[in-house]
Every structure is written in C-alpha cells, then in structure tokens.
Image: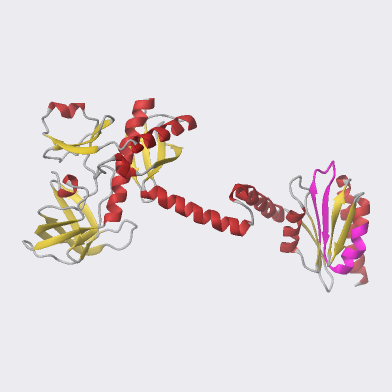
C-alpha cells in the first residue's frame, strides 16, 4: 500500500482515474452538522491520507475541492461534495503550502527524535503535528534547559550539513525490517514496508511525506517542554516556514506593544508588570462617600514601594474628577517617598501645602494636582485624617 504521494512527495499535480464514488457524510473537525457528499476512490493519488501522526492533504479533483482524505485498507478515500463518474479521467491538484508544511514538520520530528535518543537516550513514544505547533512525547520525566539547548544546536547543525533524506521500500519479510526504528504498523497494513532514511542519522519506518534533504527544513526551534502523561515529557517545536511565520507574528506583536507602552522591547515585561500593579491597586482602593449635593469621594491608596510620579498620575487620570479627592503615595512607609494629591483646584490649593507639611516634605501644584517628595511616609494616617476632616467640614457647610 504505497501511494504516489509517498513515492514522490514533491508532485503537485497528477492524472488518474475514478474507481468508485458513493454517497457519504463528513463530520467537520470543529463539530457541527454533518456535510453530505461523496467518498471517492482513485486508481492512485498525490493527496496523502492522514496517518503516522501526519494530517491529511487538501487539494482538488478537477475543480472539486477535497475536504478530507482517509485511509481504508489499501485505499485512499477522498471526500468531496460533488459526485464524480467512475472510470472518468481526472487531474489532481495539491494544496502545496499545506503539504510542504507537513513535510517540514514531519522530517523535523524524525531528526529531533533521532538526535534526542542519540544524545540523551530519550525515546519518542508519540508525536502530534498540530495546526500551530508540533509536540513530541519523550519517554523521560524531565528535560533540562541545557539539554534542550544542546539538542536544538545539534539538529540545526545537521540541517546546515545538507544531509540527504531518502525513502526506500522493503518487503514485509525482509530481515532488515527488524532493525529499523518503528512504533509498529497498522493491523490492516499490506504491501511493502516504507523506510525513511536520514543518512548516517536515522532509519525509521514511516508512511508520511518528507523532504529530500535536511536543508529543506531551513531551521528548527525547540520552544519549550511541558509535563506529559505517565511520567513523560512533551517537547514543543516549530520547523521551516512555521518558524518564519512565528517570528513574523512575534515581531508584529513587539511593534504593537512598543507603540502602546511607549518603550523598547527589552522594557515590555516591566511595563506590563507596572500596569498590572496599577490595576490591582485600583481594585484595592479604599473609598469614602460623603452625601451632600455635590458628592465628594475620598480615595486613599495603600503605600506602595514600587512606582514613580508617572505611576501615580496614571491612576489619577483613571479616577480623577473634580468630585474626587485622591491621595496617593509610593515608597517605603518607613523611609522617604513620593505623594500626590488630586481633586478640585480649590481643595488641592488649600490642602496640598498642609499635606506636604505633615509628611515633612516639599511639593508644588497646579490645575488640581499637588505632588512632591516626603521624608515621613509613616504619617500618612495623619494626612488621611486631615482629608476626612476637610470633607466633613464641606458636608456641614452644605
């Protein structure tokens, strides 16, 4: 059971004939109502049916889109929505971008698997060619960062060495079959055994489509490891064009963050941490409502060691209104720090110097904001009492 797609993984078109066509239904991968259509068997095909961890191909039979290709015994079954006449000649066209992506990921998996076993004795127990990332399940409870770095360096060195990748077929009873790495054949498999060789590195029984030289992989990036099932480790990787697309997406994201955060890529993480701190602080704000005709609110925020004047002004911009009296500080409560008072221009002009005096600091203000440096952050409680007294007086006068 060897199809044309396995004999020549690079073929993008192929002429063949329809053997059979029968009504069927297809259940979409993402769920939903079944699609009514037809299962078509051809004399041969360049569209790979899913198997060996590799998803199936897409393409056209004539002008009819192929929505799924599966293996049924020695046949490849193509699901289409239009009936095709048995015996008719047809031209197959392959979705090459999807196919080449699968070739790069699958050959990349063979290389990583072989080198992980050679370097560390980690055997591959399964793998998944996902839509976004690929995952190799290794028979080890853990993999260190140093091991992952060494493995990545080694596989990329092999890519640069331009090592050939070849495919050969062995008779099922050939003694050499027993020496080839394999996780076994399907129970209904018949015909010759297909072996994929990476010259001098690996021989592996495989039904999938592959590149013809490791240089076709371009590059491999080992992204991370994750805890697997039953004391195993999942190794996540990208190869070839997927890696290039991932770099492009990361660059676009980096540019967007640089524009939003107004700093360089190296400062993005710290900037986001500061924003998270601001959000948490806003959620912890202590609020006092005084009921008079023009409601005044007093917000006093817990003293924070981290932050600066910009940090306090961000919060003031989020909360600040003339009806709000806002008192913020940053710095160690037992040492010096910064403070900000925001509210109506009249209230801030009256209270600002008194707040600075209580905190034994200096400050200045304009347009409803007064900020400065304080030497006695431990006297914040006295400032709060002053502000509450002021609001109480405003209420009585109202």
List x then y, in percent, for residue 183: 25, 33
Q: Residue at x 20, y 64 (%)?
A: 37
Compared to residue 61, the image places residue 218 above or below, namely: above
Q: Residue 215 vs residue 350: left or right?
A: left
60 relative position to 114: left or right: left
Coloration mode = secondary structure
Left or right position of 387 against 324: right
Name the residue nearer the viewer: 36 or 141: 141
**Magenta residue span:** 326-353
Whether residue 340 is visible, yes or no, is yes
Between 94 and 157, the residue placed more toward the observer is 157
Q: Position of residue 244 (x, y in %)?
A: 41, 50
Residue in the foreground of this view, choosing between 26 and 233? 233
Is 148 or 124 nearer to us in this picture?
148
Rendered-image quadrant of the C terminus: bottom right
**Residue 369 at x, y = what percent?**
83, 63
């Amino acid at each position: 059971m060897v199809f044309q797609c396995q004999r020549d993984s690079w073929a993008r078109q192929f002429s063949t004939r329809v053997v059979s066509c029968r009504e069927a239904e297809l259940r979409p991968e993402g769920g939903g109502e079944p699609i009514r259509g037809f299962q078509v068997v051809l004399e041969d095909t360049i569209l790979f049916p899913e198997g060996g961890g590799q998803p199936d191909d897409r393409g056209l039979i004539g002008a009819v889109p192929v929505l799924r290709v599966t293996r049924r015994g020695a046949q490849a079954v193509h699901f289409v929505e239009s009936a095709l006449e048995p015996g008719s000649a047809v031209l197959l066209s392959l979705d090459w971008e999807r196919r080449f992506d699968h070739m790069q990921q699958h050959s990349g998996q063979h290389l990583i698997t072989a080198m992980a076993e050679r370097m560390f004795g980690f055997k591959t127990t399964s793998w998944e060619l996902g839509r976004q990332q690929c995952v190799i399940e290794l028979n080890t409870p853990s993999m260190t960062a140093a091991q992952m770095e060494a493995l990545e360096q080694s596989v990329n060195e092999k890519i640069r060495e331009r090592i050939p990748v070849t495919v050969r077929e062995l008779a099922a009873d050939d003694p050499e079959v027993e020496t080839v790495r394999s996780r076994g054949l399907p129970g209904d498999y018949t015909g010759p055994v297909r072996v994929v060789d990476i010259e001098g590195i690996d021989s592996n029984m495989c039904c999938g489509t592959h590149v013809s030289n490791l240089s076709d992989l371009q590059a491999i990036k080992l992204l991370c490891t994750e805890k697997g099932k039953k004391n195993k480790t999942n190794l996540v990787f990208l190869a070839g064009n997927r890696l290039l697309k991932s770099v492009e997406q990361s660059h676009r994201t980096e540019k967007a963050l640089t524009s939003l955060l107004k700093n360089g890529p190296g400062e993005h993480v710290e900037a986001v941490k500061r924003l998270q701190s601001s959000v948490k602080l806003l959620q912890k704000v202590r609020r006092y409502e005084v009921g008079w005709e023009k409601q005044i609110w007093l917000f006093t925020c817990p003293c924070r060691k981290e932050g600066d004047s910009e940090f306090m002004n961000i919060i003031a911009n989020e909360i600040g209104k003339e009806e709000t009296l806002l008192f913020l500080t940053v710095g160690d409560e037992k040492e010096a720090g910064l403070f900000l008072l925001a509210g109506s221009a009249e209230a801030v002009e009256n209270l600002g110097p008194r707040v600075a005096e209580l905190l034994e600091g200096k400050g200045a203000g304009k347009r409803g904001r007064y900020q400065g440096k304080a030497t006695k952050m431990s006297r914040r409680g006295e400032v709060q009492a002053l502000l509450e007294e002021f609001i109480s007086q405003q209420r009585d006068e109202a």
